[in-house]
Image (cartoon, rainbow, N blue to C red):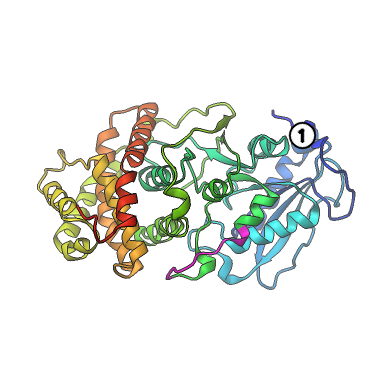
């Protein structure tokens, strides 16, 4: 077990009633009963392994509930682990259940400042990472000064997290030069000062309410030149987007990274290549690759959606994609399901073209991201068939290869961004 105590020796020792050394924040609604059970389950272990650390677990109540009501041990006791409730407005909860928004981060930063906590662990509301080992991994690099942000390295099945593998990770990596495998991971550690920056972020120029825009910790770290570490976590998150339709998820998550690109071109246009950062913790064995097969993803239905889009959305795609890309998509539509493969370079250029159309408002952003949906399903079908017989390690290397192609194709994006009317291959 990693040790927070050595790091704690350098921190002030205030003993006020509201003091804490670290804050564990849940940024989205969770089950209060479940949280109290988890606190009770790990309290003795926490006191045993970290006897000089005062920890507060802050979880949100929605308007009208008692704010900062202490629900476990007395404040200020060494080795304590206590829970408090903070208030969020109804509009501060995301449509995506695990996604923290700026208002929640702002409230958690305020609490951390009030309590004197210098480091925070932000956990998904399913509490899959609510254990002493995971919390320690997220917090220790912050408290000993090795990092200002710790992001998770999960070990999912090779057919899970495909939106992250196909768009979010490679695009974030290519734009900002940081190889953060889960740049929007639901569990992360952050210094209070960087969390304050996250709480101040607002989306500008979007068609959704500002407070509903996703906040990217890895992006903010890149913009502030903060040190990022990745830590291996063995938390098993369930189907976090269950019950949400794909266009909604794409609209919130892909739309948010497009919005960040629109806000920060001066930064990302100067970035070339990418760098790996500090990685900590023991590698977690991956879930059996056979736990979920390509067939379980219903590849044929995905290809039907792709082909339907190819027939019905040509005029819409023509507003976004250059002629050579449209020709390649038509060629794909003539392939048999077994032959269907989307080349990495084509896929990267498609995402870059949609990011440019998002910036130019070529059409309604809602409709734009809806038009991306059948293309994304086509990519998933292609990727799933390609990795079907690969083990987990080889599948991960396949993701890394795709991310490198995003980097290689970035000059295409930069040229189109700078000269959208002149550079149209």
Query: Is 55 situated above or below 245?
Result: above
Is 377 in the magenta? no
Residue 337, position as x, y percentages in the image: 16, 43
For residue 44, what is the image quadrant?
Answer: top right
**Residue 226, quarter of the rendered image:** top right
Neighbour tally class for label 1: few under 14, some 14-19, many 20 plus, Cα within 10 Å: some
Residue 298 in view in this figure: no
* Secondary structure of residue under mark 1: helix
The residue sitting at the right extreme is 15
Q: Position of residue 318 (x, y in %)?
A: 19, 62
Residue at image point 67% right, 35% down = 141
Residue at point 78%, 62% (across, down): 69
Percent position (x, y) of residue 352?
32, 52
Q: Pinpoint residue 347: horizontal percent, then vertical percent.
A: 27, 46
Say which residue label 1 marks: 7
On screen, 369 above or below 376?
below
Q: What residue range appears in magenta?
A: 199-207
Query: In this image, 112 relative to 422: left or right?
Result: right
In this view, the residue in front, 156 or 258, is 258
Give whichever of 415, 293 is nearer the camera.
415
Type of secondary structure dominating the magenta stretch: loop
Furthest residue to the bottom? 64
Placement of 174 over or under 67, stated as above or below = above
Residue 116 shows up from this direction: yes
Q: Quadrant of the N terminus?
A: top right
Say if the magenta span includes residue 204. Answer: yes
Task: Locate residue 208 relative to residue 198 in the image: left or right.
Answer: left
């Amino acid at each position: 077990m990693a040790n927070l105590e050595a790091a704690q020796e350098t921190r002030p020792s205030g003993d006020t009633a509201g003091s804490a050394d670290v804050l564990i924040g849940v940024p989205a609604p969770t089950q209060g009963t479940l949280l109290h059970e988890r606190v009770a389950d790990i309290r003795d272990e926490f006191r045993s392994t970290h006897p000089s650390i005062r920890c507060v677990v802050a979880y949100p109540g929605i308007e009208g509930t008692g704010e900062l009501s202490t629900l476990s041990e007395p404040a200020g006791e060494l080795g304590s682990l206590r829970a408090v409730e903070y208030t969020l407005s109804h509009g501060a909860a995301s449509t995506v259940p695990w996604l923290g928004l700026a208002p929640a981060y702002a409230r958690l930063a305020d609490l951390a400042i009030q309590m004197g906590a210098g480091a925070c662990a932000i956990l998904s509301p399913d509490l899959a990472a609510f254990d002493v080992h995971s919390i320690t991994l997220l917090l220790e690099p912050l408290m000993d000064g090795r990092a200002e942000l710790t992001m998770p390295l999960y070990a999912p099945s090779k057919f899970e997290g495909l939106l992250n593998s196909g768009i979010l990770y490679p695009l974030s990596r290519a734009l900002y030069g940081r190889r953060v495998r889960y740049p929007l991971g639901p569990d992360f550690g952050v210094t209070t000062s960087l969390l304050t920056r996250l709480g101040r972020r607002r989306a500008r120029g979007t068609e959704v309410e500002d407070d509903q825009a996703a906040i990217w910790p890895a992006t903010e770290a890149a913009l502030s030149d903060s040190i990022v570490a990745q830590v291996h976590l063995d938390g098993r998150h369930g189907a976090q987007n269950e019950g949400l339709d794909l266009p909604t998820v794409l609209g919130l998550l892909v739309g948010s990274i497009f919005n960040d690109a629109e806000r920060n071109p001066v930064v990302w246009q100067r970035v070339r290549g990418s760098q790996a950062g500090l990685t900590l913790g023991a590698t977690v064995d991956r879930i059996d690759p056979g736990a979920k097969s390509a067939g379980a993803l219903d590849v044929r239905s995905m290809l039907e959606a792709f082909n339907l889009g190819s027939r019905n959305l040509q005029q819409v795609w023509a507003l976004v994609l250059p002629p050579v890309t449209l020709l390649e998509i038509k060629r794909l539509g003539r392939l048999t399901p077994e032959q269907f493969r989307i080349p990495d370079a084509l896929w990267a250029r498609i995402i870059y073209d949609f990011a440019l159309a998002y910036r130019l408002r070529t059409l309604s952003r809602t409709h734009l991201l809806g038009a991306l949906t059948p293309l994304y399903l086509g990519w998933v079908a292609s990727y799933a068939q390609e990795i079907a017989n690969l083990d987990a390690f080889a599948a991960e290397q396949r993701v890394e290869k795709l991310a490198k192609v995003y980097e290689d194709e970035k000059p295409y994006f930069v040229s189109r961004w700078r000269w959208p009317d002149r550079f149209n291959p």
